[in-house]
Amino acid sequence: MPNYNHARYVAGALRAHLEQTVPPLEILVVDDASTDDSCAVVERLAATHPGLRLIRLPHNGGVNAAMNRGLREARGDYVCFSAADDLTGREFAERSLEPLARYSTAGLCFSEEAVLLGDSGVVRHVPLGLSERPCVLSPLDMKRFLQRACVHLPSHATIYRRDALLALGGFIEDLRWIADWFVNYVLAFRHGACYVPRVLAWYRVSPDSYSARGVRQTPVQRALVYRVMELLESEAFRDVAPAFRASALVPDVRPRVLMWLLASSHHRAYLTPRLVSRLVFRGIWSSFKPHVPDWLRRAVGWVVGISRRQRLAGLRSRLSAVGREEGR
C-alpha cells in the first residue's frame, strides 16, 4: 500500500485488508515521505498486527517507486496494490485467489470496477459483464474482448502473480499515473488473466487525486501517450505491441488523442479504424453529454449496454463453457 499524506483514510483501508476471509501473509505500507501523521496511524495498527509493516522512504519518489519497493520486499506469491484511500470487500482475496490457483499461468486476476465518489458516499459500478462466472482469458481472448469493448482493467480490484510482475520489471516509473494501466495489459497479453464477475473492491476518485490532476496536465499527458508507443516499439515489449494496436488501446480515450497522433509523424502509424472510431465517438458524446438530461443519459447507456452485450455474446458463451467445465 503506497501512502502519501492519507492519514484520514489509511486506517480504514488497512482494516479492510486485515479483515479478509483469507488473511494476507503480510501488509507492507510504503510511506512516500508523508508530512501528515500517516506513519503514526500505521504504527498504532502495526503494534497489534504483526503482519503489518511500515517502510518509510526518506524522500518522496512517487507512487510507482513506492509500489516497486513493496514489490521487491514482498514475500508472497501474489500481490495487490491498494491505494491508501481505497476499500476492499472481505472476500476480495479469497474470490481472486481461487481462479488464480486453478490457472497458475495467468498473470493477474481482476474483478468488477466500482468507484467511490470522494466522500459523498455515492458508489458507481461500471459493469464489465464479461462472464456469468469466474473464468480465465487467454492472451487471444483478452485481445478479442478488448476489440469488442472499450474498457480498462481495474487495478484497484486486481491481484498479480508476483513473479510475472517482477519479470516485467515492475511498474515503469516514468509512466507516472498510467504505469498500472500499462502493466495490466502487458501481463494480460503475455500470460492471460482471470476474471471474477463481482464487485470486490472500490477506488476513490476526487478532483484533486493524483491521476485526476495528472490528466489535466495536457503536455504531460500527451508525452505519456507517446511514451507508451515508444515502449511498444522497444525490444522489451515488441511481443505485445500487435495486441495493443489491434485492441485500440490508449491510456486516454479523449478525442484530443486523435489530434496528438495525427500531429506526430512518428506515432501516426498507431492509428487504426477501430481507434479512430472510438475517439470520434467519445468526442461526439462528450460534446453533447453536458446538455443531455439524466433520463436520456441513462437511456443511451442502456442502448450502449445492449450493443456491447451483443458484441460480447460469442466470447461470453465460450468463457462460460470453460467455467462450467472447470466446475465439474
Image (tube, rainbow, N blue to C red):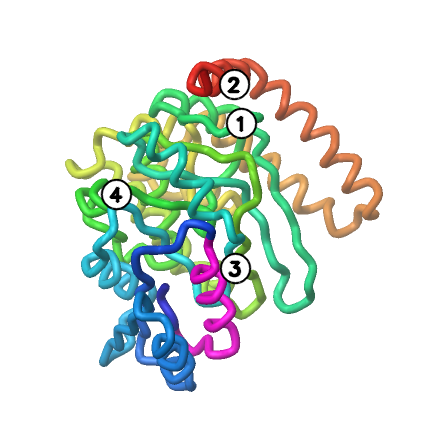
- Residue at x-position 44% and y-position 44%: 94
Residue 86 placement (x, y as % from top left): 50, 61
| Kind of element beneath mark 3 | strand
- Residue at x-position 19% and y-position 47%: 166
Residue 111 placement (x, y as % from top left): 49, 40
Between the C-alphas of marks 1 and 2, the distance is 7 Å
Confirm or deny contact between disc 4 and disc 1 (CB under 8 A): no
- Residue at x-position 49% and y-position 17%: 324
Residue 37 placement (x, y as % from top left): 42, 86
In this rendering, would 91 be left or right of 138?
A: right
Between the C-alphas of marks 3 and 1, the distance is 23 Å
Between the C-alphas of marks 2 and 4, the distance is 37 Å
The residue tagged 1 is 133
The residue tagged 4 is 230
- Give the extent of the magenta segment: 4-20
Q: Amino acid at mark 3?
A: Leu
Marks counted in the figure total 4
Dot in front, 4 or 1: 1
In this rendering, would 63 be left or right of 151?
A: left
**Closest to the observer: 92 or 269?**
92
The residue tagged 3 is 87
In this rendering, would 157 be left or right of 78?
A: right
Q: Amino acid at mark 4?
A: Glu
| Kind of element beneath mark 1 | loop
Q: Is residue 269 visible?
A: no
Q: Is residue 48 above or below residue 190?
A: below
| Kind of element beneath mark 2 | helix
